[in-house]
Image (spheres, helix red, strand yellow):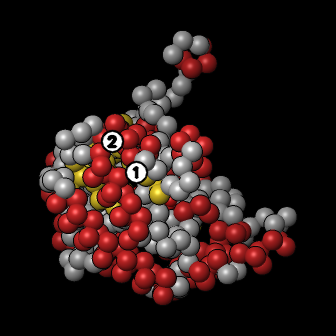
Amino acid sequence: MSSDILNNLNPGIEDLHPYEPGRSIEEVVAEFGHDEVVKLASNENPLGASPKALSILKGLENDLHLYPDGNGAKLKEEIANHENVSFDNIIIGNGSNEILELAARAFLNPNTSSIASKHAFAVYKIVTQSSGASLIEVPTYNWGHDLKSFRDYLEPSTRVIFIANPNNPTGTYNNHEEVYSLLKKVPSSVLVVLDCAYFEYVTKDDYVKPLDLLDEFENLLITKTFSKIHGLASIRVGYGIANPSLIEVLNRIRQPFNVNSIAQAMASIAISDHEHIRKSIELNSQQNEFLFDQLTKLGLDCIPSVGNFITFKGNFSGREMFNKLMKKGVIVRSVDLYDMKDFIRVTIGTESENLKFLKALEELL
Ligand SMILES: Cc1ncc(COP(=O)(O)O)c(C=O)c1O
């Protein structure tokens, strides 16, 4: 960087890259002229938005000139009921990414550090380094977070630990015991962020029960999202659950109207659309098994995933395979930015989307 203004960047920003979102269907149609494009790139819900939430969309237009409820009262009430916690335990965000960012802004500065696993969700590095802090990466064990060794990487400067459970892009998870043991070992002055964006998809009995940890650990912040199981990625809503004093601190630095009124209204309904949640889990479990088997039969090496995506490796460069699949009308994700150059991440779609993806992939192998 040469210009004077860019020389004054806050430390840590220089070696960041903008988050690379999945390619959109419109972009790919425009570039390759396909009639039909399948997007399996951003871990969205292939069944779409909660129908109950969609049904109220039409009625929301009358109040668009008014600011949203800056306190998010109705939505927080619904979340509190759903999670069986109190209203004061909840903060809502413009996607759960905003909660991650608030956590970083509240606790990180240039003299501090955060800890995350290698190959963990990219936003932890972005929010850490944009706060001027440095990120300490812990090597993975079988592609998963090696929580047993996180404590060994803790430095006196460490203020935040990010745990993606399940992790994106690896799809691995940590069980309750592993998370509990880590919380027991970590000083109570270090914030532990348990990012549960894919929580609802996990069907493992030993998966973490985050709310059981809330009373014992005042340094725990749990994050969840409406972008995945509820199918509302475009309206951007997520939430954090923690003890009320931590929530109060995060609320001090939150933008006043961070979650728009359409998002608040739709999310308030989606959270209790049990039928949509059930169908989404069922489809994902069936198709996860199907895709895993088919990919394995094609000789590809899949990381077992409890989320709504599978990351696999073949005898190819992930970036090249991503481009070739796109030319065939299938958008997946290359994960080279996660230092996984031979891998592709595919979101688990409907049966017909998955078949289209498998056919295109097979032709390219
Ligand atoms: C592990 C993880 N956490 C958080 C998010 C952020 O989701 P959102 O900001 O849409 O709630 C994502 C999105 O893909 C994710 O994969």
Is 122 on the left-hand or right-hand side of 70?
left
Q: How many marks on residues? A: 2
Above or below 78: residue 320:
above
Q: Is residue 115 visible?
A: no
Is 77 on the left-hand or right-hand side of 350?
right
Quadrant of the picture in which ligand 1 is shown: bottom left
Residue highlighted by disc 2: 321
In depth, the one of 4 and 332 nearer the eye is 332
Q: Quadrant of residue 136?
A: top left
Residue highlighted by disc 1: 332
* Amino acid type, residue under disc 1 in the picture: Val
Q: Quadrant of residue 118?
A: top left
Q: Quadrant of residue 171?
A: bottom left
Label 2 neighbourhood size at 10 Å, few (<14), some (14-19), many (20+)?
many
Is 257 on the left-hand or right-hand side of 204?
right
Check whether the beta carbons of the residues at disc 1 and disc 2 lie within 8 A of each other: yes
SS at mark 2? helix
Task: Identify the residue at horizontal 85%, vertical 64% (top origin).
Answer: 65
Q: Residue 134 in the image: x percent, y percent?
A: 36, 36
Q: CA distance from mark 1 to mark 2?
A: 9 Å
Q: Is residue 6 visible?
A: yes
Above or below 140: residue 69:
below
Q: Residue 301 in the image: x percent, y percent?
A: 17, 53
SS at mark 1? loop
